[in-house]
Image: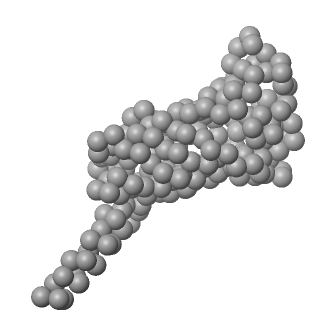
Amino acid sequence: MKSKIALLCLLAAGSTSVFAQTYNIEPSHTYPSFEADHMGISFWRGKFNKTSGTVVLDRAAKTGSLDIAIDAASIDFGHDKMNEHARNADLFNVEKYPTITYKSKSIKYKGDTPSEVDGELTLLGVTKPVKLTINSFKCIEHPMLKREVCGADASGEFKRSDFGMNYGLPRFSPNVKLAIQVEALKAD
């Protein structure tokens, strides 16, 4: 009887890790994008073309984590001169800060679906809290890879000046809107 109780306690204590699933970010299907004011007359939109990381989800316990790395030099406005300028010390300073990271502190669920991530963005060596809203989330069996793949659309906002990115202020607003498409494939 004692061994059955001990086994049940062990299973209960470890249930979160038993049900947690790890997913690897699909770099060819994940593009963090953003928009920022251009002197109050238009919005410049750009994206990052190289992203990696992992997502861990435990849907039974309604927990999880994100650990994302973005290659800052992969910035793409669709305009070569703007890309070059964005990489220099005025903006992303990719030589000194080649990687932008986002690490979750907690994931909130609405029912059985992740709906919000509280995390920390590190940009230009400065780490600040940034909340992401998960606007849509879905997992399916990938028809070609025969493994589960999950996708999401997330959004958020932050002030670039909070990270020391002050170029063009006050002509350009410090507010940045994020729109992130992400797909992640279940790890083997």
Along the horizontal axis of the image, is 169 left or right of 4?
right
> Which residue is depicted at the point 43% across and 55% down?
64
Between 81 and 158, the one nearer to me in the picture: 158
Q: Position of residue 1 (x, y in %)?
A: 12, 88
Is residue 168 at all visible to an observer of this figure? Answer: yes
Q: Exactly how many numbered labels are in the figure?
A: 0
Left or right? Give the position of 111 relative to 120.
Answer: left
- Whether 125 is drawn above or below 82: the answer is below
Q: Quadrant of residue 81?
A: top right
The residue sitting at 33% across, 72% down in the picture is 14
Q: Nearer the viewer, residue 11 or 180?
A: 11
Give residue 4's quadrant in the image. Answer: bottom left
**Where is the C terminus found, in terms of image quarters?**
bottom left
**Residue farthest toward the top in the current orientation of the protein:** 41
Residue 16, percent from left and from top: 34, 65
| Residue 86 vertical position relative to residue 106 in the rendered view, above or below | above
**Residue 144 shows in this picture:** no
Q: Is residue 82 left or right of residue 112?
A: right
Identify whether 88 is placed above or below 149. Answer: above
- What colouring style does the render use? one colour
At x 81%, y 40%, the residue is 164
Residue occupying the far left of the picture: 1
Residue under the image location 82 percent in, 44 percent down:
93
Residue extending furthest toward the right: 89
Q: In this rendered view, identify the residue nearer to me: 153 or 62.
A: 62
